[in-house]
Image (cartoon, helix red, strand yellow):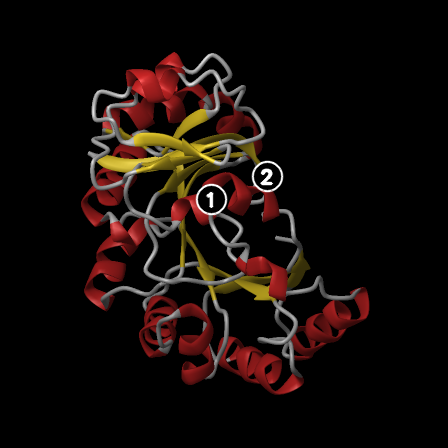
């Protein structure tokens, strides 16, 4: 069993060709620019959408745990008392209550994956396991990778690589492509912004490359964090020194996730960042191209 928050069909930005992307809940990093804040918490969470609510109070009246109350037109939930029975999501006539995340087993997910097999077969696509961080649910991830392998389906894992190297190598035995995030080369800056250092991440990237596993590196371009020339040069030097790097995807920051933070009832941590300019992106891309690395903007 595992916990996922979405299964995206016909994904074209999560690896080669047409793919199905399975999003795992839970992440050990806390990147303030994260575009999937619903994947941060490893648990299923309940959210209330104020814009949808019609104020009928049915959820308050029927909550068996009496953990819901309206104060100044705002619904408040006593998370300590809530047992996540999902009754509020079932009775709300306006669909203002929503469960983010669900428990699933391998058979559930494989049913969704197999439905899209004609797209994989005709396009050369496959399945991508993303998140959150899929390595936080290793048993579930490995079981799915093995099931896809038995079915001859191409498998990619989109990961920060912040995990023990023995786990990363166990996953590598059943994975065709790693999509690895490289956020910053300086460990202290990495820790300041994401909450974790980067030594293990760089170690795992190098180990995967040295063992002959295919890797595509994804670098979010965040103004004020990592697009300075010093960091871009260090990143390019590091990647150019490794074999098996299939290419580098530069992912310019954008504010498309703002609505997700509001929906989740979270402070909008993305507000401190501004989109990068075309000139900034071009300068970053030129550095990687000078190192003879294949570069794509947008992933």
Residue in the foreground of this view, choosing between 43 and 161? 43
For image coordinates 29% across by 16% down, the residue present is 62
For image coordinates 43% across by 77% down, the residue present is 192
Q: Earlier in the sequence, mark 1 or mark 2?
A: 2
The kind of secondary structure element at disc 1 is loop
In x, y percent, where is residue 82?
Answer: 24, 33
Badge count: 2
Q: Name the residue under label 1.
A: 265
Crowd class of label 1 (few under 14; some 14 to 19; many from 20; radius 10 Å): few
For image coordinates 80% across by 65% down, the residue present is 278
In x, y percent, where is residue 274?
Answer: 69, 64
Q: Mark 2 points at which residue?
A: 12
The kind of secondary structure element at disc 2 is loop
Q: Is residue 213 left or right of residue 287?
A: left
User: Is residue 30 shown above or below 62?
Assistant: below
Quarter placement of the N terminus: top left
Rendering quarter of residue 104 = top left
């Amino acid at each position: 069993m595992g916990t996922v928050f979405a299964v995206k069909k016909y994904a074209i930005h999560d690896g080669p060709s047409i793919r199905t992307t399975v999003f795992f809940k839970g992440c050990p990093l806390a990147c303030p620019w994260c575009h999937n804040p619903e994947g941060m918490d490893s648990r299923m969470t309940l959210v209330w959408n104020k814009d949808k609510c019609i104020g009928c109070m049915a959820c308050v009246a029927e909550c068996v745990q009496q953990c819901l109350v309206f104060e100044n037109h705002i619904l408040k939930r006593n998370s300590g008392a809530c047992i996540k029975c999902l009754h509020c999501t079932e009775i709300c006539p306006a669909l203002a209550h929503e469960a983010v995340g669900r428990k699933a087993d391998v058979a559930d997910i494989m049913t969704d994956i197999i439905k899209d097999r004609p797209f994989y077969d005709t396009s050369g696509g496959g399945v991508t396991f993303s998140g959150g961080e899929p390595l936080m649910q290793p048993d579930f991830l490995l079981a799915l990778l093995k099931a896809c392998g038995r079915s001859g389906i191409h498998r990619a894992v989109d990961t920060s690589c912040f995990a023990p190297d023995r786990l990363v190598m166990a996953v590598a035995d059943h994975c065709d492509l790693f999509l690895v995030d490289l956020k910053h080369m300086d460990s202290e800056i990495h820790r300041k912004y994401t909450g974790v250092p980067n030594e293990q991440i760089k170690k795992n990237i190098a180990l995967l490359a040295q063992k002959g596993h295919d890797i595509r590196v994804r670098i979010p371009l965040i103004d004020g964090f990592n697009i300075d020339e010093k960091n871009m040069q260090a990143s390019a030097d590091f990647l150019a020194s490794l074999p098996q790097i299939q290419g580098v995807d530069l992912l310019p920051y954008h504010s498309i996730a703002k609505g997700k933070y509001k929906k989740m009832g979270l402070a909008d941590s993305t507000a401190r960042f501004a989109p990068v300019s075309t000139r900034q992106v071009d300068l970053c891309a030129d550095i990687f191209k000078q190192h003879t690395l294949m570069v794509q903007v947008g992933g």
